[in-house]
Image (cartoon, grey):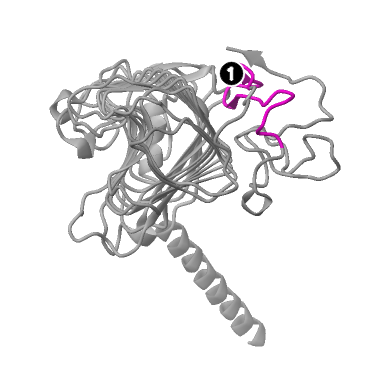
């Protein structure tokens, strides 16, 4: 009898465990790995069954993998081999990735095999990715790595709506885009990334993208739109390092535009844009040639090079490299701004404290029609200054001397620099208390560049290493 009772109790326990496991498995989904096997752009055979397949075969397309990942809760993984993936299954304004752009409605990691050989091509028919999702804890993350996104173009119906002009990736409010070794090239008619949420990026390139939008402050590279509210006030809307923006063009802002859609009243808190070890080379814009910053979106730029950027002028132009407005603040540290056209730095407020420069090379235009205004924290090289400039000069700033810079060189695809050569006034002339930890090439700061036995930070993006006899790099 005791044995029978024991067996019954064991049976009941096993049944309870079975039911618990059954409930758990039906209540939760687990991350799935999808391996793309074809470059054909086809939707999934049976969405939601957890199996990526097209044409009633075992082939798995990128679109089909995304459809399945969207319907499976959890951070799924999609692996893409080398190849060109043209988005030929066109059809705009559909939000389930069945046609047109690749809609992301659940968190997913999409991994290419090689940044230069795994290519997603929008064929100028639609944008490439659209990151949708919920708010707060239900927000989604799209992680892209080791791939290129080319020839995205937002639908023509959105051309005059700045809130939808994302040609490469459109990031909705509260969503997060993560990029690692990603190139954006030849995207058109809007910002490559239209960011309403957050972007974290490392090792990214923006090459030959263009924005033909008539909207004056839409950037061809990244446009940040921050709408202040309880759900959208994020701590950092843009955080990028090791990047290059090269040969991009815009009717408005060539590279980065940041603005807050709620300008009156301005939000109490500031939101930060952070950039480190970046190169801005040969970009062109009619309104602003590199950066427009507005409405309490604060920007910090470290160890970066700005060179050969051109302001093309026009109705909305003051010939400006940087334009700052709306209570925003810009800090530029250990960077080199050299050989650019027009006003280098202009704050609309006309006062000090909104644009601050430290340990940087600021080559100005001596034409009096171009007005520059900023505050110096010292340790800069600033020249030439004309009578209309509004600059708060410090005793530690250098206003003349031989820069003796190299031609523009690069040791890789993202870090362009103008290296101080022997005899340059920039070597060991910055302030150590404001010195960054490394330079644009990753060299630690400060070093003893003039071999006098004292380690002092160099002015600009490059820290001269006297022990390095040969500079590894290519003149461009």
Q: Residues within 10 Å of mark 1 (few under 14, many from 20)?
A: some
Q: Residue at x 46, y 58 (%)?
A: 25
- Name the quadrant of the C terminus: top right
For the N terminus, which image quadrant?
bottom right
Whether residue 150 is visible here, answered yes or no, is yes
Residue most toward the bottom?
2
Q: What residue is shown with label 1?
A: 408
- Residue 302 image point, x, y percent: 55, 42
| Residue sticking out furthest to the front | 387
Residue pictured at 38% horizontal, 61% vertical? 137
Residue at x 60% of width, y 35% of height = 460
Q: Picture coordinates of residue 202 (x, y %)? A: 55, 37
Find the magenta span and give its range: 405-427
Asked whether residue 219 is drawn in magenta, I would say no
Q: Quadrant of residue 276?
A: top right
Residue 70: image x %, image y %? 36, 42
Q: Nearer the viewer, residue 205 or 337?
A: 337
Q: Is 147 located above or below residue 13 in the figure?
A: above
- Dot 1 falls on a residue whose secondary structure is loop
Instruction: Using residue 271 as the reference point, say whether residue 244 is left or right of it.
Output: right
Give the camera-side residue of 304 and 147: 304
Q: Residue at x 56, y 39 (%)?
A: 360
Q: Main secondary structure of the magenta part?
A: loop
Front residue of 231/327: it is 327
User: Relative to residue 332, is residue 444 drawn left or right?
Assistant: right
Q: Nearer the viewer, residue 44 or 275?
A: 275
Q: Position of residue 250 (x, y in %)?
A: 29, 23
Is residue 56 shown to the viewer in this render? no
| Count of number-bearing discs | 1
């Amino acid at each position: 009898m005791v044995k029978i009772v024991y067996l019954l109790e064991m049976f009941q326990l096993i049944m309870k465990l079975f039911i618990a496991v059954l409930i758990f498995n039906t209540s939760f989904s687990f991350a799935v790995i999808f391996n793309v096997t074809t470059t054909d752009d086809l939707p999934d055979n049976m969405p939601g069954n957890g199996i990526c397949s097209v044409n009633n075969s075992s082939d798995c397309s990128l679109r089909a993998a995304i459809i399945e990942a969207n319907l499976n809760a959890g951070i799924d993984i999609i692996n893409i081999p080398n190849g060109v993936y043209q988005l030929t299954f066109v059809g705009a304004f559909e939000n389930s990735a069945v046609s047109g752009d690749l809609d992301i409605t659940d968190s997913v990691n999409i991994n290419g095999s090689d940044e230069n050989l795994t290519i997603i091509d929008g064929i100028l028919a639609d944008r490439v990715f659209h990151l949708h999702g919920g708010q707060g804890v239900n927000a989604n993350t799209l992680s892209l790595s080791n791939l290129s996104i080319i020839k995205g173009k937002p639908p023509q119906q959105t051309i005059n709506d700045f809130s939808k002009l994302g040609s490469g990736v459109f990031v909705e409010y509260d969503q997060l885009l993560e990029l690692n070794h990603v190139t954006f090239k030849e995207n058109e008619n809007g910002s490559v990334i239209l960011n309403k949420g957050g972007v974290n990026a490392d090792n990214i390139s923006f090459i030959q993208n263009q924005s033909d939008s008539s909207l004056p402050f839409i950037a061809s590279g990244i446009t940040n739109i921050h709408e202040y509210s309880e759900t959208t006030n994020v701590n950092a809307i843009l955080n990028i390092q090791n990047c290059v923006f090269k040969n991009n063009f815009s009717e408005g802002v060539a590279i980065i535009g940041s603005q807050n859609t709620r300008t009156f009243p301005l939000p109490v808190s500031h939101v930060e844009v952070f950039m480190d070890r970046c190169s801005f080379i040969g970009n062109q814009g009619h309104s602003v040639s590199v950066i427009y910053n507005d409405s309490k979106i604060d920007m910090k730029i470290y160890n970066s090079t700005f060179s050969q950027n051109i302001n093309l002028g026009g109705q909305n132009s003051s010939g400006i490299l940087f334009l700052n407005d709306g209570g925003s603040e810009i800090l530029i540290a250990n960077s080199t701004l050299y050989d650019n056209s027009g006003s280098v730095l202009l704050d609309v407020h006309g006062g000090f404290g909104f644009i601050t420069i430290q340990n940087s090379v600021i080559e100005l235009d001596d034409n009096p029609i171009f007005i520059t205004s900023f505050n110096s924290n010292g340790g800069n090289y600033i020249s030439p200054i004309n009578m209309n400039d509004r600059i708060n000069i410090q005793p530690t700033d250098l206003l003349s001397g031989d820069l003796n810079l190299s031609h523009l060189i690069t040791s890789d695809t993202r870090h362009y620099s103008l290296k101080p050569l022997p005899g340059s006034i920039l070597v060991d002339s910055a302030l150590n208390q404001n010195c960054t930890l490394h330079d644009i090439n990753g060299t630690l700061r400060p070093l003893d560049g003039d071999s006098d036995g004292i380690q002092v930070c160099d002015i600009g993006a490059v820290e001269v290493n006297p022990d390095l006899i040969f500079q590894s790099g290519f003149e461009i």
